[in-house]
Every structure is written in structure tokens, then in C-alpha cells.
Image: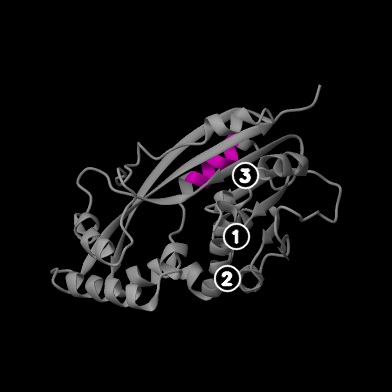
């Protein structure tokens, strides 16, 4: 199966966990939104926003509460419906069920910001930057980030210890890889600059910690494409071992650190 086909199949798996996604996935830090707004210079009065792969509205809500006019483009019909319910109180937010690559806005007005939260990597790499550029108004900005598992110094040993179970169920880490730290998460600055469509690329890093019980952690894992795609016997073995090992801890919890790399870049205008 080719890489593009794998990507298409995996990104469609999220539609089956629409109801779980909003509660299980972590909220992004308020500082990230403040930095996004400061770097892009967007204002609710002057700028419309397009969100790529909005899911059930996890990253939409903080900007909607700030009064922004947002068009959310979401591939999955169940996720789009969940977003409409979760954002029903915001009359400046519109949810469109479509794939970003072929979607065309109904208005010719350019967007002040096109952004994606833990969704940019699902968009076809030969299309995403050009499509974002076309949707932006002169001086508009592209922004994206993703919440990723990081393991800083002093982080919870649980994640290294549980790797023996992943090995057993044939879901090992790739050879030669290790857990990223907040400082070693890769950024895409060079990729953005190589498109020659954007300039003034800014990169900002954020990290935070969330504590999970066995059940809340398993709910989280149930929203990840790799775990959704596992066979039942793999999930049963893994989740059973997670429950057993966390039950042996005094507080029954695991500390998971999250990291995000925010990218913000300004649209280059044609000569």
C-alpha cells in the first residue's frame, strides 16, 4: 500500500471516534493562541479565518470565544456534525463537510489566516501550501501546529516500560527512534521556506503535562489513528496491560507530557 493511500485511510479513521475526540484529546495552551494572534496580527474585526481539518472543534472553540469569524473545513461527516453541535452557540462559525484539497469557498474574500491544529500532516503535501496560499488575502498568514507526545528529563518512566508490550503486539517504535523531548520536536520551517510561497517564518514551542487514569488514557489512545487501526487482540493485550500496571501505582495515574511546535508564516505576494 502506498504512502498516499495509507494517509488517506488513516485520516478517515478519525470520523469513527468523533464523540470521543473532543473530551479525550488535550486542550492546547492559552499561550499558544495568544502567540498565534500576536504573530499573525489577526483581529476579529478585520480577518476571516479558515481552519483545516477542524475535527469536532477542539482548536476552534478558543478562537470562536474571542469573536473570530471562522470557516471550518472537515473531511469526516461525523466529525463535521460534532463540530456543528459543539460550535452551535457561535453564529460567526461555519462548518463545511469537505476535503480541503478540493474545497472552494463560496466567497471571493481572502482569509486573514489559514490554520490547522494537529491536522496539517494529513493534507496532501503537494497541495497544502499552494492551496493555503490561494485562500489567503494579501498579507495573510498560514499557521499550523500539532500536539505530540514528548518525554522530557524526569518524565514518567511508564512509556519506556510499556514498550515491551508494543513490541509483543508488533507495534514497536521504528528502528533507531526514541521519544522526542519538548526541545527536539522537529519543526517545518525549512519546508515552508522551500515552497517560496511564504516568508517571515516564526516557530514557537510549547509543552505541558496532563495526568491520566488508566481509563482516561485508554480513551485518549482510542483517538489515535495507529491504535484505531490495531486488531482487536492487539488492543485487548495493550489496554489490559495498561490497566494492570497503572493499578499497581499508588495514585493509579500516568503523567503524559505534550509538546507543540507552532509555525506562523506570511504569504508572499507575486511580483
Front position among marks 1 and 2: 1
Name above or below for residue 210 compared with residue 48: below
Q: Secondary structure at mark 1?
A: helix
Q: Main secondary structure of the magenta part?
A: helix
Q: Secondary structure at mark 2?
A: helix
Name above or below for residue 252 compared with residue 149: below
Cα–Cα gap, marks 1 and 2:
12 Å
N-terminal of the pair, mark 3 or mark 1, is 1
Q: Magenta stretch: residue 37 in it?
A: yes
Residue 15 numbered mark, or none: 2
Residue 176 numbered mark, or none: none
Is residue 66 or residue 59 the one in the foreground?
59
N-terminal of the pair, mark 3 or mark 2, is 2
- Residue 149, image x, y percentages: 36, 52
- Neighbour tally class for label 2: few under 14, some 14-19, many 20 plus, Cα within 10 Å: many
- Neighbour tally class for label 3: few under 14, some 14-19, many 20 plus, Cα within 10 Å: few
Is residue 158 or residue 207 the one in the foreground?
158
Quadrant position of the C terminus in the picture? top right
- Tell me if residue 29 can be seen: no
Q: Secondary structure at mark 3?
A: loop
- Residue 140, image x, y percentages: 71, 37
Name the residue tied to disc 3: 125
- Tell me if residue 152 can be seen: yes
Residue 252, quarter of the rendered image: bottom left
- Residue 54, image x, y percentages: 61, 59
Q: Magenta stretch: residue 1 in it?
A: no
- Determine contact: label 3, label 2, CB under 8 Å: no
Range of magenta residues: 32-39
Name the residue tied to disc 1: 8
Residue 194, quarter of the rendered image: top right
- Neighbour tally class for label 1: few under 14, some 14-19, many 20 plus, Cα within 10 Å: few
The reply, left or right, for residue 98 in relation to residue 183 is: right
Amino acid at each position: 500500500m502506498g504512502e498516499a493511500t495509507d494517509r488517506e485511510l488513516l485520516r478517515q479513521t478519525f470520523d469513527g471516534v468523533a464523540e470521543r475526540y473532543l473530551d479525550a484529546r488535550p486542550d492546547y495552551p492559552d499561550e499558544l493562541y495568544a502567540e498565534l494572534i500576536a504573530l499573525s496580527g489577526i483581529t476579529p474585526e478585520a480577518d476571516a479565518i479558515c481552519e483545516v481539518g477542524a475535527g469536532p472543534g477542539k482548536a476552534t472553540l478558543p478562537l470562536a470565544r474571542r469573536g473570530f469569524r471562522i470557516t471550518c473545513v472537515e473531511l469526516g461527516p461525523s466529525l463535521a456534525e460534532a463540530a456543528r453541535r459543539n460550535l452551535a452557540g457561535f453564529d460567526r462559525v461555519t462548518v463545511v463537510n469537505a476535503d480541503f484539497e478540493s474545497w472552494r469557498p463560496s466567497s471571493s474574500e481572502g482569509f486573514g489566516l489559514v490554520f490547522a491544529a494537529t491536522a496539517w500532516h494529513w493534507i496532501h503535501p503537494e497541495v497544502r501550501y499552494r492551496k493555503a496560499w490561494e485562500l489567503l488575502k494579501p498579507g495573510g498568514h498560514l499557521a499550523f501546529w500539532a500536539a505530540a507526545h514528548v518525554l522530557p528529563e524526569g518524565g514518567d518512566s511508564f512509556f519506556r516500560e510499556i514498550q515491551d508490550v508494543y513490541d509483543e503486539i508488533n507495534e514497536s517504535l521504528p528502528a533507531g527512534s526514541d521519544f522526542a523531548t519538548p526541545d527536539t520536536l522537529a519543526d517545518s520551517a525549512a519546508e515552508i521556506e522551500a515552497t517560496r510561497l511564504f516568508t517571515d517564518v516564526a516557530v514557537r514551542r510549547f509543552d505541558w503535562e496532563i495526568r491520566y487514569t488508566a481509563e482516561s488514557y485508554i480513551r485518549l489512545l482510542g483517538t489515535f489513528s495507529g491504535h484505531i487501526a490495531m486488531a482487536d487482540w492487539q488492543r485487548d493485550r495493550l489496554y489490559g496491560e495498561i490497566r494492570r500496571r497503572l493499578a499497581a501505582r499508588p495514585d493509579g495515574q500516568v503523567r503524559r507530557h505534550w509538546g507543540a511546535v507552532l509555525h506562523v508564516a506570511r504569504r508572499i505576494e507575486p511580483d
